[in-house]
Amino acid sequence: MDERSVVTCFLRHGTEILLVRRSDSVGTYAGRWGGVSGYAEGTPDDAARWEIDEETGLLESTTLVRSTDPVAVVDDDHGVRWLVHPYLFDCESTDVTPNEELADYEWVQPPAILDRETVPKLWETYAAVAPTVDSVAADTDHGAAYISVRALEALRDRAAVAAQNGDGYESVADVARRLRDARPSMGVVSNRINRVMATAGPSAAAVRDRAIEGCRSAVDADAGAAVEASDLLGDRVLTLSRSGTVLDTLLTATPEAVFVAESRPTREGVGVAERLADAGIDATLCVDAAIGDVVSRDIDTVLVGADSVLADGTVVNKIGTRLAALAAVDADADCYAVCARDKIVPGTDVDTAVGSSDAVYDGEADVSVYNPTFEATPGGLFTAAVTESGVLETTDIERVAAEHADLAAWDD
């Protein structure tokens, strides 16, 4: 039996992926749905990007999320053992320019794979790179909004498989609990998982359908918050860390200049500065210790994200947020925390996770390391918190927090 290596690329826009139907011009599986695929000529990484460019014209809009070891697919009818190299890319555009190998294409929620005639083991190939409890727990590169959407995707996909296989509701509920608890400092993860479980019926199919709706509404909410905040920015802005909602706000508002604190030790602010520069915005990367100096010079607005907003208005966010907010108060600059309403959490407890000590010091001296990931900044230091509903007053925050407390009752 021949063995051939191929690549299959899943392009994800929001929470949908691109499925393509193979045309009669391809050698195998004509008429079936698949990902963007082709022979792994050269290296699989190079082949993946070449196929995306050739088949869809979307290469410049893509960012690699992950790839994994190949999935073995044995096709006795064709006498071939395929080694399928799976890839997942985030894609900013949906404007596909198909070549002759594609008879049709469609952006769909991934569970649609289970209802179509596809190339062999397409779902297994997708699942190899799809979000999971482990990937949600391990993600240190993205903000809470992005991670919460990935958690919804993981719940959606597990429920879809359970519904197809006839698995019980409890197996899906167990995954929901694990996702809910994967990022304790990110209340938006708990809130969005809780909403799905609290509003779905007690069946895997009901959870699947509600999770699909939750995926769509979460993307809309994060985008809506960015639009609301974009109208409040001055010409010169300082931000820190990496928040997808903050980045969308800045790309929408296109301020005159943006200073981005690098956010050590993982330096996720670097990617934000690069993205702003690529969009034609005057971006300056600064060291974290320079935040106070930068704000004192000529900053109109300090803009930060929020991993959580507590019921009393306290903002829990990446370390450095309090310094930026205090600097804004001292300089009489506006200071906004922008986030979706789902980041408002019940109670006033703060879970400030601690990062690896090796990221700060790996020497041999008897030195203790304090490397907090998050900190709590009092709500009184902010001009306002901004969500998709606009500017929220303290009473609004308290009311939303109470609503979210009610959602958590599904697991009582």
Image (spheres, rainbow, N blue to C red):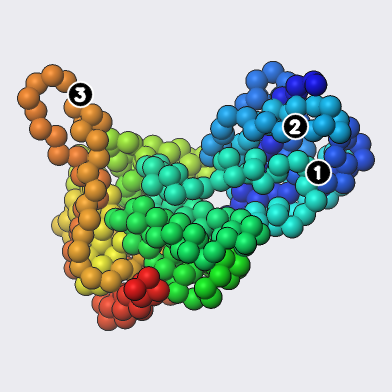
Residue at horizontal 80 percent and vertical 21 percent from the top? 1
For mark 1, what is the residue? 98
214 displayed left or right of 185: right
Residue at horizontal 61 percent and vertical 56 percent from the top? 161
Give the residue type at disc 1.
Answer: Pro
User: Where is residue 164 drawn, in percent x and y?
Assistant: 66, 59
For mark 2, what is the residue? 74
67 displayed left or right of 46: left
For mark 3, what is the residue? 362
Task: Looking at the image, tell me whether mark 2 or mark 3 is earlier in sequence order.
Answer: 2
Task: Looking at the image, tell me whether mark 1 or mark 3 is earlier in sequence order.
Answer: 1
Report crowding for label 3: few under 14, some 14 to 19, many 20 or more residues within 10 A (C-alpha).
Answer: few
Residue 3 visible: yes
In the rendered image, which quarter is residue 124 located in?
top right
Return the residue nearer the eye: 140 or 196: 196
Helix, strand or loop for disc 1 = loop
User: Where is residue 353 drawn, in percent x and y?
Assistant: 24, 48
User: Where is residue 344 drawn, in percent x and y?
Assistant: 33, 68
Report crowding for label 1: few under 14, some 14 to 19, many 20 or more residues within 10 A (C-alpha).
Answer: some
Give the residue type at disc 2.
Answer: Val
